[in-house]
Image (cartoon, helix red, strand yellow):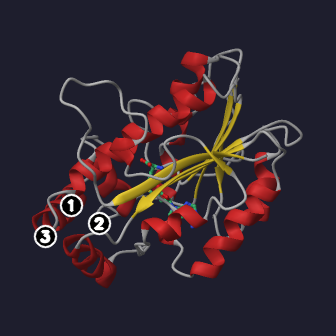
Amino acid sequence: MTDSPLAPGQQPPTIDTTVPHSARIWNYWLGGKDNYPVDRAAGEQFRETFPEIVAIARASRQFLTRAVRYLAGEAGIRQFLDIGTGLPTADNTHQVAQRVAPESRIVYVDNDPIVLTHARALLTSTPEGRTAYVDADLRDPDHVLQEAAGTLDFTQPVAIMLMGILGHIADDGQAQTIVERLVGAVPSGSYLAMNDGTDTSEEVVEAARIWNQSANPTYHLRSPDRIARFFDGLELVEPGVVSPPRWRPDPSPAGLPAEIDSACGVARKP
Ligand SMILES: C[S@@+](CC[C@H](N)C(=O)[O-])C[C@H]1O[C@@H](n2cnc3c(N)ncnc32)[C@H](O)[C@@H]1O
């Protein structure tokens, strides 16, 4: 079963193809096709300052896949709240989760009108499961939770996913309050999966400074220690908070993959 992302009679938002857009630039770095010349130009310009961004985007997405596979598999989670969904790609959360457990329910949340126009591609649920798209802002977690409750049962464990989104919340106290509110709303046995950019090289700090001169929304790097503290009170799954390529990598004869300027983790609510 699927839910329509638009209310009856509601028109999809108009796409402005003259202004670069962060969700479409992220899509470009991921090798997607949902972007326009203006996004590709901005993406290329940023890449000239910080070539690693492409590796970061792809490794972040690969972490998302491995984390969801773990959550649906080993952890037995059947409900996912994916906030900051981004544009649809090859392996969206519901596809990864429902490959493991077809009955999985997924609520996608994003506040970007561009993502809303593509949301139907996120609603291809298995008949046994369910997917829904919610047009809401992470800065209003009560609204997010209220809307998600139409699809998810909050008396049962939920995996809250904050992948590459908390950096968009500049105020540290506000980011902390949001995480606490979301984690507070789910029962014991739920999980928090998170990934965000870190201030771990001069290059990335400079790239973020340049990005924030013109980007909307802006992005704020945090230290790996600060990111780890968002998991306080939860039980971190091995290997803890690490750079995404180092979180349970698929076995490779090449050995441990190189680190990138990001930190991620998955933790269980006791
Ligand atoms: C860097 S992308 C990450 C996409 C995806 N989670 C991934 O890991 O590939 C960040 C996403 O968060 C969304 N976003 C940013 N701020 C938001 C907010 N305050 N509320 C809801 N979504 C937001 C953006 O529109 C974008 O789609």
Q: Which residue is mark 1?
A: 43
Q: Of tags 2 and 1, which is closer to the observer?
A: 1
Q: Amino acid at mark 3?
A: Thr
Earlier sequence position, callout 2 versus callout 1? 2
Residue 93 in the image, given as x and y percentages of width and height:
53, 34
Q: Specify whether residue 152 is in view.
A: yes
Q: Quadrant of residue 108?
A: top right
Residue 247 as seen in the image, left or right of residue 226: left
Earlier sequence position, callout 3 versus callout 2? 2
Above or below: residue 188 compared with residue 164: above
Q: Residue at x 71, y 19 (%)?
A: 103
Q: Amino acid at mark 2?
A: Pro
State the SS at label 3: helix
Q: Residue at x 51, y 79 (%)?
A: 170
Q: Specify whether residue 35 is in view.
A: no
Q: Which residue is mark 3?
A: 49
Residue 20's label in the rendered image is 2
Q: CA distance from mark 2 to mark 1?
A: 9 Å
Q: Is disc 1 in contact with disc 3, using a CB cutoff of under 8 Å? A: no
Residue 106's label in the rendered image is none
Earlier sequence position, callout 1 versus callout 3? 1
Above or below: residue 118 compared with residue 121: below
In front of the other: 9 or 18: 18
Residue 248 in the image, given as x and y percentages of width and height:
43, 34
State the SS at label 2: loop
Q: Is disc 2 in contact with disc 1, using a CB cutoff of under 8 Å? A: yes
Residue 138 as seen in the image, left or right of residue 269: left
